[in-house]
Amino acid sequence: MELNIGAIAQLGERYNGIVEVKGSSPFSSTSCDNGLNLHDEICPRRVGKVRVAGKNKKKPGKVSERAVDNRAGEKPVLLSGGNPQIAKADGDAPVQAYIAAMPGWKSELGRRLDSLIVRNAPNVRKAVRWNSPFYGIKGQGWFLSYHVFTRYVKVTFLQGALLQPEPPGAGKDKDARWYDIYEDDFDEDQMAEWVRQAAAIPGWDGFETLKR
């Protein structure tokens, strides 16, 4: 299934093989080589490495919470718009590292949002991909992600078109809908209702962590 992922990057970011397409608008038709179209038009890609004769290739290991790149207490870099740069990893630890690095009032919002999701989707799984937290249910897929922008936090429901009422943000993707949260403007009751609905329906299977 091809999907635009709302709120996972901003123009000007280049990290871990993510390539931006400059000058394009959100939810435009730029396609990635892995079958995805991404909001704000960046595409994850494979980055080639030079092979050295006589050297064995390393086998890719399972991405885990140990992959969180917070060595020696270093603070994560803030990318354009103030979005934290967090290495891709699975579990609660990378999500908490992201939340702790969210600037200003957005960090407290991140804690409230994370707690709300856990309360309303008790079996939720977590991961960080493309410098954004993802939340999903095993056997169903990923249903929510969020990303920091300069003046707000964008919360994207990956199958938001099926929610009632639909979240107000929409683009060219027929499935995704989003909700921009500004300072002192967080409707927790509505967010909780959306989370309950989104966690109960099939989500997005764009990466396979939930199948293990």
Image: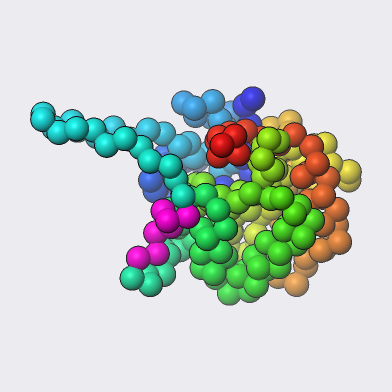
Q: Is residue 68 magenta?
A: yes
Q: Is residue 146 visible?
A: yes
Q: To which quarter of the image does residue 206 belong?
A: top right
- Magenta residues (range): 65-71
> Closest to the observer: 194 or 24?
194
Q: Quadrant of the C terminus?
A: top right
Q: Is residue 28 visible?
A: no
Q: Going by the image, does 193 lie left or right of 51?
A: right
**Residue, far right:** 164
Residue 211 x %, y %: 59, 34
> Which residue: 78% across, 44% down?
198
**Numbered disc total:** 0
> Which residue: 69% across, 50% down?
124
Name the colouring of the figure. rainbow
Q: To which quarter of the image does residue 180 belong?
A: bottom right
> Closest to the observer: 188 or 91?
91
Q: Is residue 63 above or below residue 58?
A: below
> Closest to the observer: 69 or 18?
69
Q: Going by the image, does 208 lie left or right of 152?
A: left
Residue 182 x %, y %: 71, 65
Residue 12 x %, y %: 44, 50
Q: Is residue 196 magenta?
A: no
> Which residue: 69% across, 43% down?
137
Q: Going by the image, does 76 lie left or right of 189?
A: left
**Residue, far left:** 54
> Which residue: 60% across, 70% down?
107
Residue 64 x %, y %: 46, 50
Q: Quadrant of the N terminus?
A: top right
